Amino acid sequence: MESLHFGVRSIANQWHEALLSKPTSTALHPQLLPTDQAVAVIQNMPDDAAWTWNGICLAQTGQGQTVFHEGLPENAWLADAAQLFEYAGTGLKADLPRLRGAWRLRPLQEEERDSWLTKGIVVHGPMDQVLVGPGAILRDASLNTEQGPVVLGPDSEVMEGCRIRGPFALGEGSVLRMGSLVYGPTTVGQGCKVGGELSNVVIHDWSNKAHGGFLGNAVLGSWCNLGAETTCSNLKNTYGEIAEWDEGLRAFETKGRTFCGLLMGDHSKTGIHTAFSTATVVGAMCNVFGDATPLRNLPSFSWGGQNEQVHDLERALQTAKKVMARRNQAMDAETEARIREAFAATRG
């Protein structure tokens, strides 16, 4: 869970940087998010203390002999996957002070507005809310910073004709392809290729949605690939409350949301023109294709999309390793072992 993104970077990465100045080692609950208030509570924790909430230990220093019952700060608890897109703007805002140093971001200045305009860059809103990392490329685009920043990580690229409304962050080495439409809050991790239309989406590292199609109120894990024109619904035709899959209950339950799109696990992929229903959950290592609408809950290691056919484990691993090699990455033995354990537990 700590590898999930709170904004544009992982929860674990943000906690590590936030607590660098704290000399005492601190154990953290994996669902605790590094909001400003949560970081402040932990930075002020004494040695040998435990912070509890509703009987849950959120953080502990030393042996945790002194227990205190601090309230849970707003938006500091990750209850389900959909909250990743709901908290995307909060996460980016909380991480931005650290991100400025980690990515060596430079804010554009008001006196640069006309110069950027001659290059085809139109900025609606404060110029200093456009933050650019070393090596980032920005061409012929429209940026709106009235509702939040537009952050371009090192060596990222915004191609011609893109229109972006912040809050938005594009990770290191990622590419926003020509003519993309982005509505914030949206964050894209490192090494991604993204195109089409996105609205309030969190895309984790090394995933691709490189072609047309709509993705809204959605979360993509790492190493996903959406085929051309893959599209998801994020709103029911009735405008009613959405029933979402609850893995713990093994049933669909309403949770008060009107908007929820695709939630997809790591290493899953779709064929061209795949159309997902509202609040579809796709597990990890799935290969989704076919001429019918996929089921709204596809367990990990699914093959197809309308039945219970299982993706062959060795074939799934082989594909994953090929994809990673294309990005000069390799699957380590620990990751492969975890995948095999997950398959044995769910499909074996």
Image: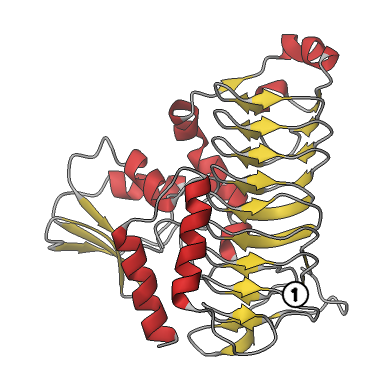
Label 1 packing within 10 angstroms: few (<14), some (14-19), many (20+): many
* Residue that carries the numbered disc 1 in the rendered image: 278
- On the image, the x and y values in percent for residue 6 come to 51, 52
- On the image, the x and y values in percent for residue 306 come to 70, 86
Of the pair 37 and 220, the residue shown nearer to us: 220
Of the pair 251 and 208, the residue shown nearer to us: 208
Say which quadrant the N terminus sits in: bottom left
Residue at image point 55% right, 83% down: 246
- Decide if residue 102 is on the left or right side of residue 242: left
Q: Is residue 83 above or below residue 15?
A: below
Say which quadrant the C terminus sits in: bottom left
Residue at image point 69% right, 73% down: 257
Q: Is residue 271 above or below residue 139?
A: below
Residue at image point 41% right, 44% down: 14
Q: Residue furthest right?
A: 237
Q: Is residue 91 above or below residue 347?
A: above
Residue 5 in view, yes or no: no
Secondary structure beneath disc 1? loop
Q: Amino acid at mark 1?
A: Thr
The quarter of the picture where residue 18 lies is: top left
